[in-house]
Amino acid sequence: MLQQRLLSRNSLQAELNRAQFRANRVLAVNVLSAPGSGKTALLEQMARLWPMGPLAVIVGDLATERDAQRLQAAGARALQICTGDLCHLDAALVSAAWGELGSDDLRLLMIENVGNLVCPAAFDLGEQLRIAILSVTEGEDKPLKYPALFKGADAVVLNKIDLAKAADFDRQLAIANLAAVAPQARLFETSARLQQGLDGLISWLIDELEH
Amino acid sequence: MLQQRLLSRNSLQAELNRAQFRANRVLAVNVLSAPGSGKTALLEQMARLWPMGPLAVIVGDLATERDAQRLQAAGARALQICTGDLCHLDAALVSAAWGELGSDDLRLLMIENVGNLVCPAAFDLGEQLRIAILSVTEGEDKPLKYPALFKGADAVVLNKIDLAKAADFDRQLAIANLAAVAPQARLFETSARLQQGLDGLISWLIDELEH
């Protein structure tokens, strides 16, 4: 019941965030994945390649400022939220961070959620799009085992494809599992480390911004 | 406050579980990691190698029975708990599962928690030992970013060492980060896929059982 009340308070704040992002012509994207899937590496490359002003990033982690520092070094306008022992970001945290970060030259806000395939799925942050990242080293079955997160994704990024062979990754099986759980999601295949496959993802985000 | 009450009810059940495990001369081990770190693959190999009767495994996942099926095929006495949207196992779930699974020929119970580096750390299951698994593809910084989980571990298993080179894994840095956050933890380095390094882990568990 407390969980219900917290969720409904969160939904209200999320709608406020969404209205504010729309009014400012900002596209906000909630990025969800397991720990170590390469979220920050992917956002570093995006910060280098993004053509419409600086990339804004809000980063959630239990502890350390290291991801925001990495992203700033890559040219992003990045702000770290240390959640302590909170296992997900919520709409109020994002609102406060955007209050500090927001400015007129920002068009795309990537919100890097806490690395967790469970809890973040239940919390709307006021984003317009959700991206789930799955790295090939995590195994083909993750969409089946964490269905809520993948069902809610507008796009899935299959990352670390440079490790597919070393990890004996079965690409067809992973894609079939994704199609079964998340038929609505676009698929991008990337290697953040080798800077491969990011152009498709960036083109899609530009299209979404201009619609 | 609800979280506090839930935790204290859980602690009580955890103490009951621990007393029952002790009375039955069973060593119970809580296995925690991110999704895709290779928990199930490691337990499959352990089930094949464990020398003191069948290996008992309780497996927690949001959805699917596949891990229990994989473990049974490897010779384990395995039981799946599907948690739905619950992001961690708790002591009551483990007690119920052990009620179904427990028998006189079982000495070692491995409890494979939900893949999550945050929430499971706060819930005592009544185990005598905790093992955290970190795969090399997740990056060297995870102990710093998820400190609570690693601080509470009696041992850390660095898994997927066969992928270390392909993933540019910095072993010295990972070990330094582990030493900073979790100096109490023993370290084992394994490749579940190539069946490497499990002998040390198994010897340690036998020692703990016999003490």
Image (cartoon, coloured by chain):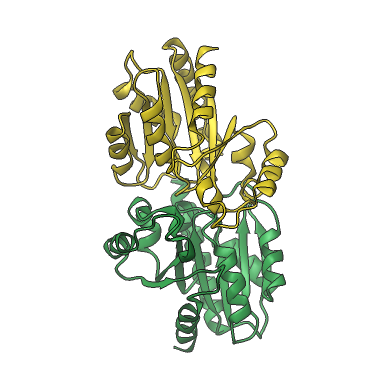
Chain colours: A green, B yellow
Name the quadrant of the N terminus of chain B: top right
Q: Residue at x 33, y 15 (%)?
A: B105
Q: Is residue A52 above or below residue B171?
A: below
- Left or right: residue A171 versus residue A35 is left
Q: Residue A156, located in which quarter of the rendered image?
A: bottom left
Q: Residue at x 46, y 68 (%)?
A: A131
Residue A36 location in percent, x, y? 54, 55
For the question of whether residue A159 can be seen, the reply is no
Residue situated furthest top in the rendering: B23
Residue B26 location in percent, x, y? 43, 17
Q: Is residue A196 above or below residue B9?
A: below
Q: In this view, does B211 lie above or below B1?
A: above
Residue B58 location in percent, x, y? 37, 31
Residue situated furthest bottom in the rendering: A210
Residue A149 location in percent, x, y? 40, 58
Q: In this view, does A13 lie above or below B25?
A: below
